[in-house]
Image (cartoon, rainbow, N blue to C red):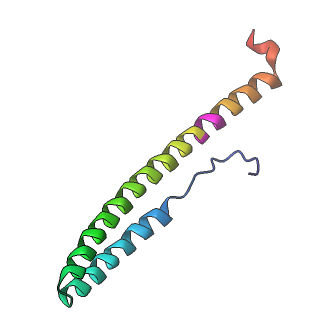
Amino acid sequence: MAESSEYVLLDTKSFDTFMAQKESLDDIVKTLLSNWVGEGADAFEIDAKKVKANINDIYDILKLMCDTLTDCRQIFDECDKALGDYNRNPEANK
């Protein structure tokens, strides 16, 4: 990662894009189930609901991780700047 005086943030837009696409998956599952009956359809519906719940959980975890990393990066940048300021003129800070 290149050094910069600007904050480098992690972009979570791809997660939001994925979650928006998940909605189209819901439509596909509904369409499929409206044309499919029987034990196979019932089993598929149960599995599809589990997959959807897992996708939501994974999204929440990844979003939290990225937000935490963004916060950590900002703190590191602030500490780096403060240390740099101190090291440039340590006598003034006594």
Q: Magenta-highlighted stretch: main secondary structure? A: helix
Between 67 and 79, which is closer to the camera in this rendering?
67
Per the image, is 36 magenta? Answer: no
| Furthest-top residue in this view | 94
Relative to 89, is 84 above or below? below
**Residue 27 horizontal/vertical position (percent):** 27, 81
Residue 6 left/right relative to 91:
left
Relative to 42, is 10 above or below? above
Who's the residue at 70% across and 44% down the image? 5
**The quadrant where residue 73 appears:** top right
Residue 88 left/right relative to 73:
right
Between 29 and 77, which is closer to the camera in this rendering?
29
Tag count:
0
**The quadrant where residue 70 appears:** top right
Residue 88 left/right relative to 20:
right
Per the image, is 74 magenta? Answer: yes
The part of the chain drawn in magenta is: 73-77
**The quadrant where residue 85 appears:** top right
Split into 4 quadrants, where in the image is the C terminus? top right
Who's the residue at 33% across and 79% down the image? 24
Residue 43 left/right relative to 86:
left
| Furthest-front residue in this view | 39
Who's the residue at 65% across and 37% down the image? 77
**Residue 1 horizontal/vertical position (percent):** 74, 51
Between 12 and 31, which is closer to the camera in this rendering?
31
**Residue 45 horizontal/vertical position (percent):** 24, 74
Who's the residue at 20% across and 91% down the image? 35
**Residue 93 horizontal/vertical position (percent):** 74, 13
